[in-house]
Image: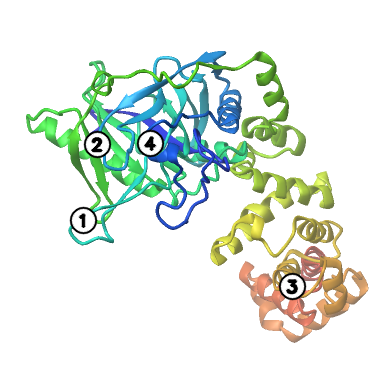
Amino acid sequence: MSQWEVVIGIETHVQLATASKIFSGASTAFGAAPNTQASPVDLALPGVLPVLNRKAVECAIRFGLAVDATVAGKSVFARKNYFYPDLPKGYQISQFELPVVQGGHVTIAVGQGDKAYEKRINLTRAHLEEDAGKSLHEDFHGRTGIDLNRAGTPLLEIVTEPDMRSADEAVAYAKALHALVRWIGICDGNMQEGSFRCDANVSVHKPGTPFGTRREIKNLNSFRFLKEAIEYEVRWQIETLEDGGKIQQATVLFDPATGETRAMRSKEDAHDYRYFPDPDLLPLVISPEWIDRTRADLPELPQAKKQRFMAEYGLSSYDATTLTASLETADYFEATVAVAGKASAKPCANWVMVDLAARLNKEGLEIGQSPVSAAQLGGLVARIADNTISNAIAKKVFEALWAGEGVSADAIIEQQGLKQITDTGAIEKLVDEVLAANPANVAEFKAGKEKAFNALVGQVMKATKGKANPQQVNDLLRQKLAG
């Protein structure tokens, strides 16, 4: 397969976080009974007219600014004509020749360690459109039900250039885009509910030759499925070409049960949809003042925050990238550092990325649901930094905080008598007792067995119930054994 180059472009349908639909006042809330949130506009009843949702436009502007794109001063809505049972009008209102967002880019981080690299993925466009309804096949034996609650829900369709060269890059892009739209507050990112859906255009060709014929994998609603679908499609296309076959342009579906893609229909081109400007909607005009107001309202963006974390807190690129994977994680980290102090930024990062993340993952919780607040974790890190407790004791305090046993690390340390023993005289006395009681370990250490030293350290820590300062114990033991 190394003789072949993979070419991938992604189209993403992002459901915008508006309370009402893009051209009607009907609710966009998920989970209502079928057809209870479909207005006469959504049902395409005779005589109704669409009215554009200002909040949806605001979301598009926010996205355009976040990806350093051109926000068009004037864009036009068009009718995309096709027949499908869950499309009441027989056409979808979208944008074609003049989209609201033009160009832009997203920077992705791929891989880890020495193999990690960053790559810029260029965007072609992002345009506003309405979603279709939903066909329900499972609930009706031999028939199909139509639920029009989703019809008219505002979407931003984001289209990349064919810049990705592997399934890993495609997934990294999808994750970065998913984090970004949640970060700037234009989408809840709930993939199970269909708020973020990806289509992958995949082709292969020999390096130095023109791009191959692409096939579009539709409606991928998880990062795992995106990766599996692309990897299967790449293998299938290469095997087909190496066996002397030809790739036909087509739309395909991925079946998670089999791990395979299957053709759904031959791929349509733009002329098949007979696009023309929607006569019921005036051109969308966005003033420079509106763009400026929206820019002023944007939060600090992930890439800028990552660079600031590296400069201000001395974090590595990997740590800063991990901590800015979501706005919630970045805010939690900064709130932790605010309590623990900038000098403890790296320990704070480690606690957030390792201990806290592992516990949240185990419990299936998001960071916003953490029983341990940022202030509590910051207080815990501060007590490690000033040698009130050791790292080992800190783990016990963290567990107590998680279980809700105290309002702060200080309270738990006080209640449970966990303060670290730093009295050199007291520790020296215990070291002497341990050496006297373990002559075999002493002899083994003097014979060059380092494990014997660890055993002696363990005996001292056991005698103090883990409360002795580990560094003092190590230093005193080595002094005594060298004497």
Q: Quadrant of the N terminus?
A: top left
Question: Which badge, 3 or 1, comes first in the chain's sequence?
Answer: 1
Residue name at image x 55 percent, y 37 percent: 181
Q: Nearer the viewer, mark 4 or mark 3?
A: 4
- Residue sticking out furthest to the front: 47
Q: Can the viewer see residue 163?
A: yes
Please name whichever residue, 207 or 57, is drawn nearer the observer in this view of the structure.
57
Coordinates of residue 87 in the picture (x, y in percent): 32, 38
Labels 4 and 3 touching (C-beta < 8 A): no
Task: Give the residue number, with chain letter if any, for mark 4.
Answer: 44
Against 471, residue 436 (above or below) is: below
Three-letter code, disc 3: Gly
Helix, strand, or loop for circle 4? loop
Task: Give the residue number, with chain letter if any, for mark 3.
Answer: 404
**Left or right of 365 in this view: 168:** left
Three-letter code, disc 2: Val
Task: Give the residue number, with chain letter if any, for mark 2.
Answer: 234
Look at the image and name its color scheme. Answer: rainbow
Helix, strand, or loop for circle 1? loop
Question: Which badge, 2 or 1, comes first in the chain's sequence?
Answer: 1
Residue name at image x 55 percent, y 28 percent: 60
Q: CA distance from mark 3 to mark 1?
A: 52 Å
Task: Give the residue number, with chain letter if any, for mark 1.
Answer: 143
Q: Quadrant of the C terminus?
A: bottom right
Question: Which badge, 4 or 3, comes first in the chain's sequence?
Answer: 4
Three-letter code, disc 4: Ala
**Left or right of 231 in this view: 248:** left
Three-letter code, disc 1: Arg
